[in-house]
Amino acid sequence: MLLVLSEEHKEHLSFLPQVDAAVVGEFGRIALEFLRRGTSPKIYEGAARKLGVSVEMVQHGVEGLMFLMTESSKHMISEVDFLDSVLVLGFSEELNQILLQLYLQHHAHIRSILSQLPSNQPAYHNLEWRLDVQLASRAVRQQVVPILTLRLLLSGVGDGVCARRGKVLQTDPSTLLHLISTLEGALAAMKSSHARRIFRNIK
Amino acid sequence: MRFRFCGDLDCPDWVLAEISTLAKLSSVKMKLLCAQVLKDLLGEGIDYDKVTKLTADAKFESGDVKATVAVLSFIFSSAAKHDVDSESLSSELQQLGLPKEHTTGLCKSYEDKHSALQGKLRETSLRLGRLESVSWRIDYTLSSSELREVNEPLIQLKLQSQGAESGSTETTVVSVSADKFRVLLAELKQAQVRMNALQ
């Protein structure tokens, strides 16, 4: 499929042919850092001073480049389609090749970053457990009560990777056995013929 | 195939796959890598630059480096967890296809740090709300708005414990009258007698 670039986007990217190839590579690197870590105005100011253009033009150029990369990675477009989409901008052949190389090198990485974005459900992170035996309490001595203490660590909930919440649970051995058999039943459901038929059709 | 170092379960597929990656390193480099991984497991931090330098000869990509560190961490921590002696670990790793020189190097490092590893694992086991400190103060109440002559001792106890989330501290302040405190002390002494009987 071809990317359709808006007029504004094309205008922002029209800054790129005015600088030489090394600078475009540098902009590509800044754009990828933007995706990974965000950006700081200092970088734009430094580049603008060196090139003798306004900060806005640099910022638009970098952001336009980043948007081009994310849209291409999002739709997983092929090399040919990428070149055709970029052809619309009327750049030189060399610039097109640079953009293509940038795309090919980084699209897998960009896709992995993008896939981490919608993390709003708490997800399983880790389960710690401890098996204790209660021997006595204030009220009753000479007991033997096995107790399993669990701490379920969840990640996500809006903050991305950080913010681990832990839930502390306690259970006795018979409940634990029931829990295990229920979870094994859930795993076995993945191997049922109904589930297999669906997986085959997705693949 | 059941392996003792995996807790009498099958060896995970990814471990099997990465053992062949491990075999690509020279045995000397692998021993140094084991030392780094053990340092990390004992909480002293890992020096990733050294690790990348050690694996540079075998031309590992970043994915391979991470996989190697992961598989070594798994082998060491799992073997320490199930209290496997180094001869059994050595024979099981050779069954999985790790060459003999690598296995001897690995097992020697494991044997050296075996008890330190187990101590560290014991420390990091699940503990809820560890008590950190106790401080107390005894006051003597002379009089109050309800009664002119009270003349009773009162104990203020401050307990600081680790909260349910790691890193947070909870402070509990209680004031206990003399009689209640005697009961508390008697019960705690009984619990202490039972704990000492266990040790």
Image (cartoon, rainbow, N blue to C red):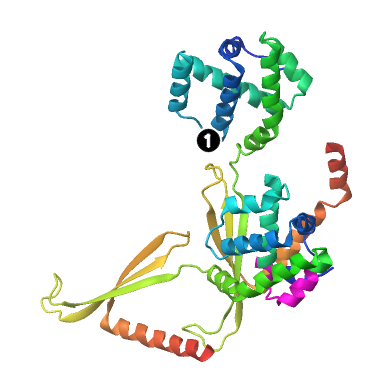
Three-letter code, disc 1: Arg
* Range of residues picked out in magenta: B77-93
Q: In the image shown, does B144 or B197 lie closer to the viewer?
A: B197
Residue depicted at x 60% and y 9%? A7
Pinpoint residue A65: horizontal percent, then vertical percent. 60, 21
Most extreme residue toward the left is B148
Q: Quadrant of the N terminus of chain A?
A: top right
Pinpoint residue B178: horizontal percent, then vertical percent. 26, 83
Instruction: Check the image and report above or below for B172 versus A11.
Output: below
Residue A201: quadrant of the picture: top right
Viewer can see residue A181? yes
- Asked whether residue A71 is drawn in magenta, I would say no
Residue depicted at x 75% and y 24%? A77
Look at the magenta stretch and give its main secondary structure. helix
Pinpoint residue A138: horizontal percent, then vertical percent. 46, 83
Residue depicted at x 40% and y 88%? B189
Instruction: State the residue position of label 1.
Output: A37
Viewer can see residue A1? no
